[in-house]
Image (cartoon, rainbow, N blue to C red):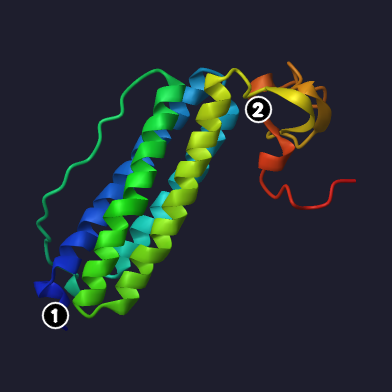
């Protein structure tokens, strides 16, 4: 079956996805601000990193609607209200929402797009669904560490990186204060979780 985008359920799904990604970006930005207040800077960085990716997802979905420029698309949809001062709860809510986007939401949107004759849009839903799964994994792992009191402590000696200046130090615990830039422990992350951690360290 092939129909015009303006007459399709896929158009409504694109707008639902655009709205959802836009709201996720804002929720993660709000969560990042809370984590900053609580000196959980590594969580702040994770929320902001993910928020930037959600913005890109929103733009991809938005651009698929280019032929409808100037129109108003009316949709129905439900979106979460994740308001709490508990960073662990924010991580768990984000994990839940990302997994829900992965499956069933974007998988069903991809199936609908494919059945209506929009393979490129179906591909976007399918590919972004996989990214949302990695987002959920990331939030879940950070929640596990925070809830177990091991965000800055390890059972085995490991390397820690300061996200502010890049200093790397080994130990069972992240330094209370970075010896290079004097930033607090909240800036430290396990080296294997740090950005570009696959690069060689000298």
**Residue 49, image x and y in percent?**
52, 44
Q: What secondary structure is marked by label 2?
A: helix
Residue 148 picture quarter = top right
What count of labels does the image hold? 2
Q: Is residue 32 left or right of residue 6?
A: right
N-terminal-most mark, 2 or 1: 1
**Residue 168 position (above or below residue 9):** above
Residue at horizontal 18 percent and vertical 67 percent from the top: 11
**Residue 8, image x and y in percent?**
13, 71
Residue at horizontal 68 percent and vertical 35 percent from the top: 163
Residue at horizontal 78 percent and vertical 26 percent from the top: 156
Q: Nearer the viewer, residue 96 or 195?
A: 96
Residue 106 picture quarter = bottom left
Furthest residue toward bottom: 2
Q: Is residue 13 visible?
A: yes
Q: Is residue 182 left or right of residue 136?
A: right
Instruction: Decide: few, some or many residues near mark 2? Use Cα within 10 Å; few <14, some 14-19, many ≥20.
Output: many
Q: Which residue is mark 2?
A: 187
């Amino acid at each position: 079956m092939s129909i015009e985008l303006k007459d399709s359920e896929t158009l409504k799904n694109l707008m639902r996805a655009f709205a959802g990604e836009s709201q996720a970006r804002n929720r993660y930005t709000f969560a990042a601000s809370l984590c900053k207040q609580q000196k959980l800077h590594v969580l702040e960085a994770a929320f902001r990193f993910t928020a930037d990716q959600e913005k890109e997802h929103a733009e991809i979905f938005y651009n698929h609607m280019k032929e409808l420029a100037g129109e108003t698309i009316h949709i129905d949809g439900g979106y979460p209200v994740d308001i709490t001062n508990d960073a662990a709860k924010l991580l768990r809510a984000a994990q839940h929402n990302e997994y829900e986007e992965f499956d069933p939401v974007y998988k069903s949107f991809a199936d609908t797009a494919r059945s209506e004759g929009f393979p490129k849009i179906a591909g976007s839903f399918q590919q972004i669904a996989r990214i949302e799964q990695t987002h959920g994994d990331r939030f879940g792992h950070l929640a596990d560490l925070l809830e177990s009191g091991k965000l800055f402590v390890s059972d085995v000696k490991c390397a820690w990186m300061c996200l502010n200046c890049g200093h790397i130090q080994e130990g069972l615990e992240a330094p209370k204060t970075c010896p290079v830039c004097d930033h607090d422990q909240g800036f430290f992350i396990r080296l294997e979780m740090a950005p570009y951690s696959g690069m060689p360290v000298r």
